[in-house]
Amino acid sequence: MSMVVVRDLQKVFRQGDSEVQALAGVSLDVAAGEFLSIMGPSGSGKSTLLHLIGGLDQASAGEIRIDGRELSRMTDDEITMFRRRKIGIVFQFFNLLPAHSAEENVALPLLLDRRRPRDVRPRVEAALAQVGLLHRRRHRPDELSGGEMQRVAIARALVIDPAVILADEPTGNLDTRTGEEILGLLREANQARRATILLVTHEARAAACGSRIVTLKDGVVVSETTTSPSAVAPS
Ligand SMILES: Nc1ncnc2c1ncn2[C@@H]1O[C@H](COP(=O)(O)OP(=O)(O)O)[C@@H](O)[C@H]1O
Ligand SMILES: [Mg+2]
């Protein structure tokens, strides 16, 4: 079954008199439980694609279906609610609320979804424990390292038990070793929780986490490769 279906997706940005065609007809099928990597040069449309799939911006044309729901048929409020329940998003620069502690940042998607506080606490603690940061739960982002901030962001994505995780260059601002830890958490979410993952990355090593790599250029898919299982070190 396909978890994410993208058909002929187009996105045009208009700025005054000029137009930028960020996506020029992208089609993609991502199976439930798949780990897909998306590569491509800067400006090729990777972030735009993830933003549209996450319902953070609207397509100019084309279709996006997630878990059978067509985004263009939903109202803004429905998309917001759908995202809160189904989609975890991880950004390059973490996007944490600076004035709030780690646990408050992780609780946010549940509180916005009006879950009862007594249901929220154990889930927040479980998500922070999963990324190894329960002991830092009362710290604010400015008291955490980059790797720790990204782990908080991953806990915030995991706390809803998402069907889909969208990660836009999540290791782009981290050193290699810290980046490996973040990729390990995404792999674990994929393998242990069967979350479908779309990972945008510049790094071939990170892309190799996926079972398939799609490459964008100038807003279209220019290549697609299946990564060899033998390339993964035996455990
Ligand atoms: N909000 C925006 N307004 C205008 N142009 C944009 C906007 N977002 C992206 N673009 C343009 O769309 C193209 C694709 O951008 P983006 O999706 O960010 O690429 P990537 O993530 O692959 O680097 C680029 O030419 C970029 O300048
Ligand atoms: Mg980008």
Image (cartoon, rainbow, N blue to C red):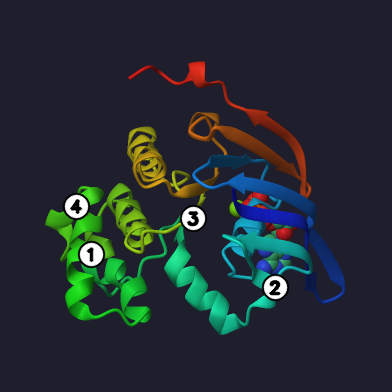
- Left or right, residue 199 beside residue 45: left
Could you say which quadrant of the image residue 119 lies in? bottom left
Q: Is residue 169 visible?
A: no
- Chain-order first, disc 4 or disc 2: 2
Assess disc 3: are there few (<14), some (14-19) or many (≥20) residues with their C-alpha within 10 Å of its C-alpha. many
- Chain-order first, disc 2 or disc 3: 2
Please name which of the two marks, 1 or 2, marks the residue nearer to the observer. 2
Q: Disc 1, disc 2: CB below 8 Å?
A: no
Residue 200 location (% of width, % of height): 56, 46
Instruction: Residue at 44%, 71% (x, y): give it.
Output: 84
SS at mark 3? strand
Measure how far apart labels 2 and 3 are at the Cα level.
Answer: 18 Å
| Residue behind mark 2 | 72
Q: Disc 4, disc 2: CB below 8 Å?
A: no
Q: Residue furthest front?
A: 1
| Residue behind mark 4 | 129
Q: Disc 1, disc 3: CB below 8 Å?
A: no
SS at mark 2? helix
- Chain-order first, disc 1 or disc 2: 2
| Residue behind mark 1 | 124
Depth check, front residue: 118 or 172: 118
Residue 6 location (% of width, % of height): 70, 55
Q: Amino acid at mark 4?
A: Ala
Depth check, front residue: 188 or 68: 68
Instruction: Residue at 65%, 51% (x, y): give it.
Output: 46
SS at mark 4? helix
Instruction: Residue at 18%, 61% (x, y): give it.
Output: 125
Question: Which of the numbered marks, if any, corresponds to residue 164?
Answer: 3
Measure how far apart labels 4 and 2 are at the Cα level.
Answer: 37 Å
